Amino acid sequence: MSDYTLYSYFRSSCSARLRIALNLKSIPYDLVPVNLVKDEHLSESHKALNPSKTVPLLICHKARGGDFKIGQSVAALEFLDEVHPQTPLLPPATDPETRAVVRTLVNVICADIQPVTNMRVMRRVRALGGSAEDWNRELMTDGLAVCEAVMKDSAGRYSVGDEITMADACLMPAVWNAQRFGVDVKAFPTVMRVFENLEQHPAVVKAHYFSQPDTPKELQSQ
């Protein structure tokens, strides 16, 4: 058994953030697929592990006191960065301003974009008679516009300067989702430049939606 187990769904952007981070830090982990379409995350067994009834769920098997569970992706990202400081996902503590920029981009994606466009919300939009796809396109477009405005001042090769940060781990799946729903991502040139710089990174390739053990065969990368 690896030191970590990650409960994940191949197309979960929150899960992909952690896959990218774990890969960047070369941390081995065991992956347990949870099929959101089949509502496996709503099972009593999963709820017992993660009261939020969501993925990802990261379990550290060598924490003090035994298994330590983290059921929110941003908390898990920060935990991994503190426990495994190699390949840091935040700028050094001596640079609080740049750390704040990274966290700003993380929160734009993880608070303003993803929660309001996830499967749970899409189901409710449809139940109210709306178009979940239109809803997602509009909110993703708004959020990426904020990322673009921030990154015009912060980006180098990556979202904040020339080192990969947790902002990049969050950005990649956000753009994958936007592409899936037909957002005109080319309208955000800074975002797309950073995305293209990250796209071929081995940690990102390995974490991609279409490269997971639970990816349906018709979608699996060749």
Image: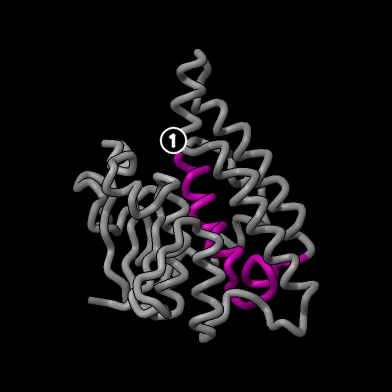
Q: Position of residue 67 (x, y in %)?
A: 35, 71
Q: For this rendering, which residue is in front, 100 or 7? A: 7
Q: Which residue sits furthest front?
A: 65
Q: Quadrant of the N terminus?
A: bottom left
**Quarter where residue 183 is shown:** top right
Q: Identify the residue at image location x=45%, y=33%.
A: 120
Within the image, what quadrant is residue 57 found in? bottom left
Q: Residue at x 53, y 37 (%)?
A: 117
* Residue density around tag 1, few if under 14, some if 14–19, many if 20 or more, within 10 Å: some
Q: Classify mark 1: helix, strand or loop.
A: helix
Q: Percent position (x, y) of residue 4?
A: 34, 72
**Magenta highlight range:** 154-180
23 part of magenta stretch: no
Name which residue type carries label 1: Met
Q: State left or right for residue 113 relative to residue 70.
A: right
Residue located 40% across and 73% down the image: 23
- Residue 196 in sight in this render: no
Residue identified by numbered label 1: 119
**Is 208 positioned to the left or the right of 127 in the image?**
left
Residue 195: x and y in percent read: 55, 60
